[in-house]
Amino acid sequence: MYCIKRVFFCKKLVTLLLTVFFALPMVAQGDLLITPRRVVFEGNKRVEELNLSNTGRDTSVYNVSFVQYRMADDGTFQEITEPDPGQNFADKNLRFFPRTVTLAPGEAQTVRMQVLNRERLAPGEYRSHVYFRSVPKEGALGLDNADADTSALSIRIIPIFGITIPIIIRVGESDTRVAISDVALQKVDDSTNVVAFTFNREGNMSAYGDVRVTHISPDGTNTLLGAVNGVAVYTPNKKRNFQVLIDRAVIVDLKSGSLKVEYLSQSDRNPAKLAEASINL
């Protein structure tokens, strides 16, 4: 998601600062790598450390703050300042340190997150996103060329990379349920197919898991067509429309058999099945 954050005017030089937001798994953008990709405080958990690493060749500075998002039905994020009905922000019950991080090339550092006053929160889920915003070097905003024509209008675009990580506080027991509906095989072009479907969420907390799409041939052979890890349906959303791209390298007959879509909890050992749906081809 791109947005223009600040505009500077200096001797008819217009500098546009573009901020790029990403919510990516092992999260990496620009030269910043962050783990884990999301934080959930539940049960007795009150402290988490985010690990930051500079994979680039230059020293980088990042400011740390909170932003608030709503999730649209297509899974995109929209920045907001007030919660939607049924949505709760978490930032007022979170503390983090430090608020500015300077990383030399190859250097790593942790940002410590802590929950405050959890016992005062009503049962439910609270979500905010911690935002790591790169700070541009001061020299990038100056007029270094003394011979430049100051009567002309010039435009300099400086990308400011930013990464957001969801931070979630859960209070009480979850009664969340997820179902999958409207499964359809859709042809994008002559060589590209997707499986489209809708998540339907009910309950007091968000859902999070991995998606698997499998083709089952008439003789019972199972072939994995595509997978997407780390798919969320955040509160207060009741649904999310989703698509899985079918791997072009997999050769199956998409005119026979059936398609199975599974939504699985993340686990290295035995992931639980959150939802499942199938269609005949």
Image (cartoon, rainbow, N blue to C red):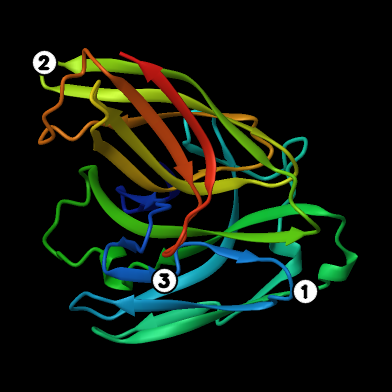
Amino acid type, label 3: Thr
On the image, the x and y values in percent for residue 39 come to: 56, 65
Mark 1 vs mark 3: give the one in front: 3
Name the residue tied to disc 2. 190
How far apart marks 1 and 3 lie (CA) works out to 22 Å
What mark, if any, has residue 35 been given in the picture?
3
What is the tally of numbered marks visible in this picture?
3
Quadrant of the rendered image containing residue 139: bottom left
Residue drawn 30% across the image and 54% down it: 159
How far apart marks 2 and 1 lie (CA) works out to 54 Å
On the image, the x and y values in percent for residue 44 come to: 74, 75
Instruction: Give 7 or 246, whichever is nearer the viewer.
Output: 246
What mark, if any, has residue 116 been given in the picture?
1
In this picture, residue 65 sits left or right of residue 217 = right
Residue drawn 29% across the image and 77% down it: 54
Amino acid type, label 1: Leu
Amino acid type, label 2: Asp
Query: For the residue labelled by badge 3, is the local secondary structure a helix, a strand or a loop?
Result: strand
Q: Above or below — where is 100 with respect to 218? A: below
On the image, the x and y values in percent for residue 126 come to: 72, 54
In this picture, residue 33 sits left or right of residue 273 = left
Mark 3 crowd level (few <14, some 14–19, many ≥20, 10 Å Cα): some
